[in-house]
Image (cartoon, coloured by chain):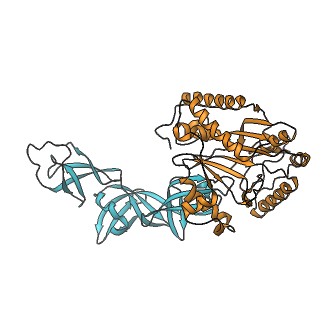
């Protein structure tokens, strides 16, 4: 069994049957008093981040989680199908479980699938993906102000704000952590 | 996590040398003498939440513990007639690690005979302002006098609950203190927190109002020091040690022996006195605006 001395960024524990990952932690000890570990932890099922304070030395249940690199194959109803590139085993995650990640999935995209007690609960897409613009207003000629942006829709349905020079058919680099436009990709 | 203001290792060396030098000058100018006491001691301190490093001799026999503070030996020097003493030494505490904790850290401890905790609070105020000037970090917010706040007032103000309500729940008290109170203490200027519950008196005497004659200074949410009007009653001190031992036994942690020579010296006589223990690394961290005590140490354990 683990205890609070095992807590570090990314440590995964079970609280009331739900897996949580440590986002941040700090050891605190009021003078001559009981020591605590203050943590920010992320509910791995819902993504919600909460604060929780543990007594120093408190026993913790380690969450049985595993991350596996998999390839996105295709959509099937309200779900998406992934394949383990080593074992060729396939599994499915619902769009609800995938959340924002559905916007970063193209045929063949490599993702890290998080498994909790053997069942998939979510994926981490690559930090950057390249997606093609399917819809956006043409830029106004002669408008060079750099702060101005316009909305664009990408091939996966993702909506982003892009600079005025971006056109339909352009390939854009997107940061999947923020969902923001990074740059237009040449070629 | 490094803060923007974290100094380089060469700056750390220079800052530490200047700080230590300024502390020495401050106390020597006020007729204190510098003392040194051993690191390996027969009893490392009895507080229930302290974890000490055990020391074994080359044959594997138990040889004592690393001191968690030089308190017992310095008070024995008071009992032997010393009247103003200070010490800069390493102290060692196990299972404490974080931005304000390190298993081995530099402690400044000083004692005044025939003095009260108020005298020692005044030393603290003057010393901190003095060393800030010496480090070219003069800060108007450090100028004495600092605000006094009782534990009860701090709880009422920041957590909306009185000390009475927490009297039977020490863990609840510390949890509330760590979460709701301490992070807000001394945000603008250092604050002196006084009137601790008698159950947290440790080696402090009790005041006439029944509270412990103990103070702690907080600055920017960090505990800087812990001082006492010293308990001089040997019998009461023995009762508290025995109570601490019982608590440790009940908590399933190592039970440290009572330092009988310390108690014998208390019995022989300790003048009314005040003392304070201050974390030098924390002081430097706060003075230069670093993000952790590790940022102002040349070799914190994680870089050793």
Q: Nearer the viewer, residue A93 or B46?
A: B46
Q: Nearer the viewer, residue B268 or B57?
A: B268
Question: Residue at left 80%, top 56%?
Answer: B255
- Residue A168 screen position, x and y as percent: 14, 52
Chain letter, colour cyan: A
State which quadrant residue A100 falls in. Answer: bottom left
In the rendered image, the quadrant that contains the N terminus of chain A is: bottom right
- Residue B1 screen position, x and y as percent: 50, 44
Q: Is A173 left or right of B74, judged from the image as shown?
A: left
Q: Is B67 left or right of B104, judged from the image as shown?
A: right
Question: Residue at left 88%, top 49%?
Answer: B263
- Residue A113 screen position, x and y as percent: 41, 60
State which quadrant residue A135 falls in. Answer: bottom left
- Residue B95 screen position, x and y as percent: 67, 50
Residue B17, visible in the rendered structure: yes
In the rendered image, the quadrant that contains the C terminus of chain A is: top left
Q: Which of B180 and A98 is in front in this view?
A: B180
Q: Is B218 left or right of B232, judged from the image as shown?
A: left
Residue A182 vertical position relative to residue A20 in the rendered view, above or below: above
Total of numbered circles in the picture? 0
Colour that chain B carries in the picture = orange
Residue A26 vertical position relative to residue B111 in the rendered view, above or below: below
Residue B303, visible in the rendered structure: no
Residue B211 vertical position relative to residue B272 in the rendered view, above or below: below
Question: Residue at left 82%, top 45%?
Answer: B64
């Amino acid at each position: 069994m683990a205890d609070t001395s095992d807590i570090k960024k990314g440590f995964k524990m079970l609280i009331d049957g739900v897996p949580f990952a440590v986002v941040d932690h700090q050891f605190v000890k009021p003078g001559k008093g009981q020591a605590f570990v203050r943590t920010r932890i992320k509910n791995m099922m819902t993504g919600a981040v909460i604060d929780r304070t543990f007594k120093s030395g408190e026993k913790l249940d380690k969450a049985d989680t595993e991350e596996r690199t998999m390839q996105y194959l295709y959509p099937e109803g309200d779900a998406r199908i992934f394949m383990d590139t080593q074992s060729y085993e396939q599994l499915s995650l619902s769009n609800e479980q995938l959340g924002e990640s559905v916007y970063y999935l193209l045929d063949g995209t490599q993702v890290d699938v998080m498994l909790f007690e053997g069942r998939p609960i979510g994926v981490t897409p690559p930090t950057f993906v390249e997606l093609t613009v399917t819809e956006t207003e043409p830029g106004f000629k002669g408008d060079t102000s750099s702060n101005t942006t316009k909305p664009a829709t990408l091939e996966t349905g993702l909506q982003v704000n892009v600079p005025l020079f971006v056109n339909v058919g352009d390939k854009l680099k997107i940061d999947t952590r923020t969902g923001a436009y990074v740059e237009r990709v040449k070629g | 996590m490094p803060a923007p203001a974290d100094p380089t290792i060469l700056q750390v060396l220079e800052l530490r040398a200047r700080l230590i030098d300024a502390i020495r000058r401050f106390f020597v100018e006020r007729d204190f003498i510098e003392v040194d006491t051993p690191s390996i001691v027969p009893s490392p301190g009895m507080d229930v939440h302290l974890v000490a490093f055990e020391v074994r001799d080359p044959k594997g026999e138990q040889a004592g513990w690393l001191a968690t503070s030089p308190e017992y030996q310095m008070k024995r020097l008071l009992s032997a007639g010393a009247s103003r003493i200070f010490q800069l030494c390493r102290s060692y505490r196990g299972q404490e690690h974080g931005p304000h904790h390190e298993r081995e850290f530099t402690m400044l401890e000083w004692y005044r005979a025939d003095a009260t905790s108020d005298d020692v609070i005044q030393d603290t105020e003057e010393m901190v302002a003095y060393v800030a000037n010496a480090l070219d970090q003069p800060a108007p917010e450090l100028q004495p006098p600092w605000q006094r706040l009782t534990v009860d007032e701090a709880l009422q103000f920041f957590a909306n609950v009185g000390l009475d309500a927490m009297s039977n729940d020490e863990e609840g008290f510390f949890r509330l203190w760590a979460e709701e109170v301490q992070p807000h203490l001394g945000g603008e200027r250092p604050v002196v927190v006084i009137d601790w519950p008698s159950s947290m008196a440790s080696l402090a005497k009790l005041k006439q109002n029944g509270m412990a004659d103990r103070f702690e200074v907080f600055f920017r949410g960090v505990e800087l020091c812990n001082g006492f009007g010293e308990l001089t009653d040997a019998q009461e001190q023995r009762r508290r040690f025995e109570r601490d031992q019982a608590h440790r036994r009940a908590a399933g942690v190592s039970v440290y022996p009572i330092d009988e020579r310390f108690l014998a010296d208390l019995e022989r006589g300790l003048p009314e006195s005040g003392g304070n223990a201050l974390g030098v690394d924390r002081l430097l961290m706060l003075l230069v605006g670093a993000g952790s005590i590790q940022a102002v140490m040349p070799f914190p354990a994680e870089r050793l």
